[in-house]
Amino acid sequence: MPISIYLAILGGGAAGAVCRHLLDTWIMNSLAASFPAISPFLYFPAGILAVNVLGAFCMGALAGTLSRSGKDYLALHSLLGTGFLGSFTTFSTFSLNTFSLLLLEGLLPALANILLNVLLGLLAVWAGFRLFGPRRTAAPSGSRAE
């Protein structure tokens, strides 16, 4: 694969990660400012939920646009799909994979993909936290509970 593809992924990935942080922060700060009475209780990650849904929509739009063209846009998909949207949210890739399973294989494989990703992902987070986290029960350092 040409180096330009890796550079496209790198550039898109850097931009996507920064955009995820900015959008998440803006949404959470806006919610806190709009609802000051409940701002101490804003533990639900509404910003990340919005990022995930927006990223899934954009991944679908990108896949649909590239599919409709009938051409191979490896550099464009590498920049926007793998790079930007992949770091903006990996949820967009998961959503596209699940949608593809639904279209090509049916409902059961798509549901299996959803359940396995969510359950195994939660189990992996738990295992990593238990193995490498503090010995006492505490909220993970990236949580809103801090």
Image (cartoon, rainbow, N blue to C red):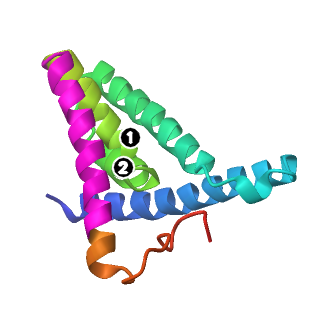
Q: CA distance from mark 1 to mark 2?
A: 5 Å
Residue drawn at the location 31% of the way across and 19% of the way down: 68
Check disc 2 and report the residue beneath it. Answer: 90
Closer to the camera in the image, 40 or 114: 40
Closer to the camera in the image, 105 or 136: 136
Expressed as whole percent of the image width and height from the top left, the position of residue 81 reads 35, 44
* The N terminus, quarter of image: bottom left
Check disc 1 and report the residue beneath it. Answer: 92
Dominant secondary structure of the residues highlighted in magenta in the image: helix
Q: Which quadrant of the view contains residue 105?
A: top left
The amino acid sitting under disc 2 is Thr
Name the element at disc 2.
loop
Few, some or many residues within 10 Å of mark 2 (<14, 14–19, 20+): some
Q: Which residues are magenta?
A: 105-127
Expressed as whole percent of the image width and height from the top left, the position of residue 11 reads 41, 63
The amino acid sitting under disc 1 is Ser
Q: Which quadrant of the view contains residue 50?
A: top right
Expressed as whole percent of the image width and height from the top left, the position of residue 83 reads 36, 54
Name the element at disc 1.
helix
95 displayed left or right of 102 = right
Q: Residue furthest bottom?
A: 135
